[in-house]
Image: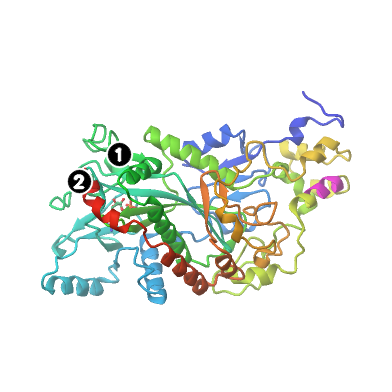
Amino acid sequence: MEMMAGGYDTRDILRPLVFRLHENVPAIVREVLLERGWTEFDKKEQDDADWNLYWRNSPFRMTDHHSIKPWQRLNHYPEAVRITRKDYLARHLKRMKGAYGSTLYEFSPVAFIMPNDYVKFIAEYSKERHSVGRRPSYWICKPVDLSRGRGIIIFQDIKDLVYDCTVIVQKYISNPLLISGYKLDLRLYVCVTSFCPLTIYTYDEGLVRFATEKFDLDSLDNVYAHLTNTSINKYGASYKKYKEGIGCGCKWTFSKFRSYLRIFGVDDMVLWQKINNIVILTLLAVTPLPVASNCFELFGFDILIDDKFKPWLLEVNYNPALCLDCSIDDTVKRKLLHDVVELLNYKQIDTYRQNQVAGLKTSRRQVPWSTAGQSATEHTPGLLTCQKVAKCTSAYSVQPALQAARGSIRKAATLTKKTVSMHPRKTLTSQLRERMNMPKIPSQAKAEAKNKQMPGAGHSPPKSAQLSHWLPTPDFCNYKLTTPPYFLSDKDQRPIPRVGDFVLIFPFNEAALQASRDGTDIKSIIKEINKLVSKQLPSKQQNRKKRIGYLTSV
Ligand code: ADP
C-alpha cells in the first residue's frame, strides 16, 4: 500500500470518479467510463451521493434533481421530452412559426397531429387535390411516441391512412438528396449543457444513415427504400451487400460525407451553418425549460437534406442510439462519449464527493425552484425557471468551488462529529470519509485539491479561435451562484468554445449571449439569427445548381 507523509493512503486522496448507471444503459457508456479510469457505483458499499455521473435512459425523478450535489451530473434535464415527442415538437415549432415568421421556421415539414388536427388535415389535403396543375403531396404518418421507424406509413391517397394511436401526419420530403440513388439522413449529436443561459454544442462528427434499397416513389411501402433507420435497414436483404457508391452496411461518417460533397463542389460549410441554425431555433422553441443544476442532455437530431441542399428537421431523439452495429458506430460513438465526459468538465476536487459535504453543504448551488409559469416561492435546491435565476440567486456570494472545498478539507477535523451524524451508515465511503476528516492534511493532498482537471480530462485547445472574441466579461449571466456552472471555463467563466469535437454554437455572439441572460429574450435572439442568416447566403449557389444533377445521378 502506497503511503503518504501524513499517513494517508494515496488512493484515499486520488480517488477515481464514480459513475452510476440505471438499467438498460448501452454497454458502451460503461466501457468508455471504465476506459477513462472511472469506477462503477456500488449501492451496497457507497453512500447515496457518492457518485459523479448518473446516466439513465428515462427521466430522473424530481428528488434526484433537488438533491443534486456540486460534484454530480445527470444526463437528462427535466421536461426534455417537450422537444423529443413528435407531437410536442410539432406544436412548439408551429407556435414559433406563428410568432416569428415561417421564413425562419420553415425547416420542419408541415405536420398535423391526429386525431386532433383531422379537420385541418382534410382541408389541406382537399385544397391540394383540387388545385389545378399541382401534384398532390406525399405524406408520412408516424406514431408520436414510437421510435426506430416503428408503425410508420407513407401515403399519397388518404384511403391509405390508418392509425389507432396519436400520430403525426407530416409532409413527406419526396425529393431527398440521393447518393447513387439511395436516400440518406444525418444523425447529428447535440449536447445542451444549460437551458438557462442556453448553451448548445453540436458534434462535428456524426452518422449518415442510408436506406439500403434505391429510392422509388412507386413503392411507398418499401421501408428499405424510404426509411433510413438502421434498426430497419440492418434486416434488409441488401444491408451486407456491397452497394455501388455507398459500400456495405448503411452508414458513413460526417467526415466522409462532407469530403464527398466537396468533391462535387458543394459548400458543406453553408449546409452546416443552416443545420446549426435549425438546432438553435428548435431549442429556442422549448425555452424556458425548468432550469436544473448540473444536468446535460445529449440529443440526436435527425436531419434530411433535399435535392436543393435544404436541410429539414425530421425529429429530435431523447437517448440517441448508442448501440454498436458496425465499426463506424464504434468509432463515432466511443469518441462522442469520451467528448461528452470532457464537456462535463470534472475537476480533481469532484473525486472527494462526500468529503465535500461537510464544508460545502451550506454554500453550494442552492437555487430555488419553480416550473415554467409558476412563481418561485419556496427555496428548494435544484431547479428554477430561467427568469428567476438571476433574482433568486443574487443574494448568494460568488465563492469558487475549489476554494470552498479546500476550506472544507481544512475545517474537516472540527466537523467530523457532525459529518458522522449526517451519515450514520458505516459504508466503505464513510470509513474513508472519517479517515479523510483526520486533522492532518498532507501538503500534496492540498495541492491536488487545487483547481485541477482530472488527468486525461483536459480540454483540447480550441481548433478555431474565431469563437472566443465575442464572449463577455466574467459576470456571465449575472449568475451569483456559489459555484460557477460546470460548463464555464475556470479561466474566464465563459462557455468553452470547443471541447473535443463539440463546438459551441450558442451563444454565437455577444448580443445572443446578452439576450440569454436574465431569462431568454427570444425576440432579440431571433433578430440576431436573422442577421446571421442573411450573412450566410450560399456563396456557390450557381456552381451548386450545375452540380446537383450530377451528384444525384452518380
Ligand atoms: P422514428 O422516431 O420512428 O425513427 P423518424 O421521424 O425519425 O421516426 O422517421 C424515421 C425515418 O423516416 C427517418 O429516418 C427518415 O428516413 C424517414 N422520414 C421521416 N419523416 C420524413 C419526412 N417528413 N420526409 C421524408 N422522410 C421522412
Residue that extends furthest to the top in the rendered view of this protein: 1
Residue 539 figure quarter: bottom left
Q: Amino acid at mark 1?
A: Cys
Q: Is residue 411 magenta?
A: yes
Q: Going 11% across and 73% down the picture, which residue do you hit?
A: 132
> In the picture shown, does residue 28 fall above or below 190?
above
Q: Position of residue 549 (x, y in %)?
A: 21, 51
Under circle 1, the secondary element is loop
Amino acid type, residue under disc 2 in the picture? Ser
User: Is 86 one of the magenta-colored residues?
Assistant: no
Residue 539 or residue 106, whichever sits in front? 539
Question: On the image, numbered disc 1 is attached to which residue?
Answer: 250
Residue 478's label in the rendered image is none
Name the main secondary structure of what is drawn in magenta.
helix
What is the x, y in percent for residue 341?
57, 43
Q: Is residue 119 above or below residue 27?
A: below
| Residue, disc 2 | 553
Give the colouring mode of the picture.
Answer: rainbow
In the image, residue 537 lies at what x, y percent? Answer: 38, 62
